[in-house]
Image (cartoon, grey):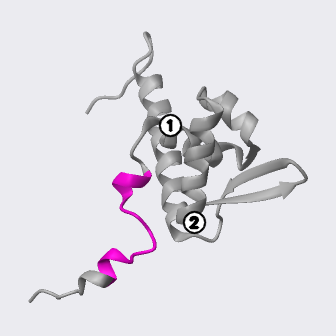
Amino acid sequence: MTLDIPDILIQSSPFPPIEEVLSSKGKIKILKILTHYEELNISEIVRRAQLNHATVSQHLDYFKTVGIVQEKAFGRIRIYRLSPEDAKVKVIRDLMESWEHSELESDMQNRPGSYIKTF
């Protein structure tokens, strides 16, 4: 049995597909940075991501539109962070942290002279 979902409900989905959210290295870098550093201003995100200001601004605007990034304003300074209450943000955080942990484990195992257990 299949469910027939009206096209209007699919098209009006408030959150885009994961392919769109993670569609570029730049977006992934920004998400990784915000996962690690919690809150940063745009200049610091630009520096850490090694992307230009316009690109970072465009990606942050996109993330704000889909609700996974929040912006706080202090005069002219804007601080960005991942939306803590969003369930999809938790998944993104878990993915980034798991991936980073796996990279560290892989690096440790591939170092010359490291002890690797084999069974």
Q: Position of residue 100 (x, y in %)?
A: 51, 38
The residue positioned 39% from the left and 45% from the top of the image is 23
**Relative to residue 34, is residue 98 drawn left or right?**
left
The residue positioned 63% from the left and 43% from the top of the image is 57
Residue under pointer 2: 67
**Relative to residue 43, is residue 67 drawn left or right?**
left
| Above or below, 15 relative to 38 | below
In 3D space, how far apart are the residues under numbered discs 1 and 2 (Cα atoms)? 18 Å
**Relative to residue 108, is residue 53 drawn left or right?**
right
> Outermost residue, left direction?
1
Looking at the rendered structure, the kind of residue marked 1 is: Gly
Q: Position of residue 8 (x, y in %)?
A: 30, 83
Displayed quadrant of residue 42: top right
Q: Position of residue 117 (x, y in %)?
A: 35, 28
Q: In this view of the protein, can residue 112 be seen by the observer? A: yes
Q: Residues within 10 Å of mark 2 (few under 14, many from 20)?
A: some
Q: In this view of the protein, can residue 68 be seen by the observer? A: no
Q: The magenta stretch spans which residues?
A: 9-21
**Relative to residue 56, is residue 19 drawn left or right?**
left
| Above or below, 78 relative to 72 | above
Depth check, front residue: 87 or 6: 6
Looking at the rendered structure, the kind of residue marked 2 is: Gly
Q: Secondary structure at mark 2?
A: loop
